[in-house]
Amino acid sequence: MSAVIQGSGTMVRPMPNRERRKEPLRACVQSALDLYFMDLDGHKADGVYDMVVGQVEHAMLESVMQHTRSNQTRAAEVLGINRSTLRKKLKLYGLL
């Protein structure tokens, strides 16, 4: 699923299809990492933990903020984190 840029210059993500994945999120991440290591083609891997956590966290924050219609209090509740922690993470990923 990729983002689409509208004529106004705003980025809109298409709605996910309603098909349910048979594999859990963990399996999807593992599959993506397997492809990542294959694509390295012998080159050294560095900072994989931070890369994966950053990518997953960014996507999760975007989805939760969309789900809560940018209501930070509700988003913090959904995520199970403090609102100030949420704001810090939103700033980190340029979502605020």
Image (spheres, rainbow, N blue to C red):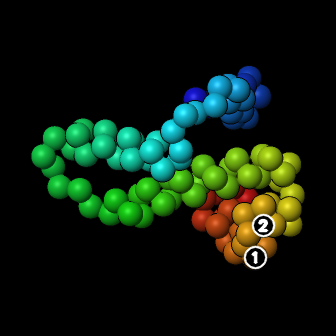
Considering the numbered disc 1 on the image, is that residue within a helix, a strand or a loop?
loop
Residue assigned mark 1: 82
Left or right: where 40 falls relative to 81 = left
Residue sitting farthest toward the front: 22
Residue assigned mark 2: 76
Residue sitting farthest toward the left: 42
Question: Which residue is located at x 23 percent, y 56 percent?
Answer: 45
Q: Nearer the viewer, residue 38 or 4?
A: 38
Relative image position of residue 3 (x, y in whole percent): 62, 31
Image vertical order of residue 23 relative to residue 56, above or below: above
Nearer-N-terminus badge (1/2): 2
Question: Which residue is located at x 38 percent, y 63 percent?
Answer: 49
Quadrant of the snapshot with the C terminus = bottom right
Q: Residue flagged by tag 2: what amino acid is it?
A: Ala
Question: Which residue is located at x 25 percent, y 46 percent?
Answer: 37
User: CB atoms at circles 1 and 2 under 8 Å apart?
Assistant: yes
Q: CA distance from mark 1 to mark 2?
A: 6 Å
Question: Which residue is located at x 21 percent, y 44 percent?
Answer: 40
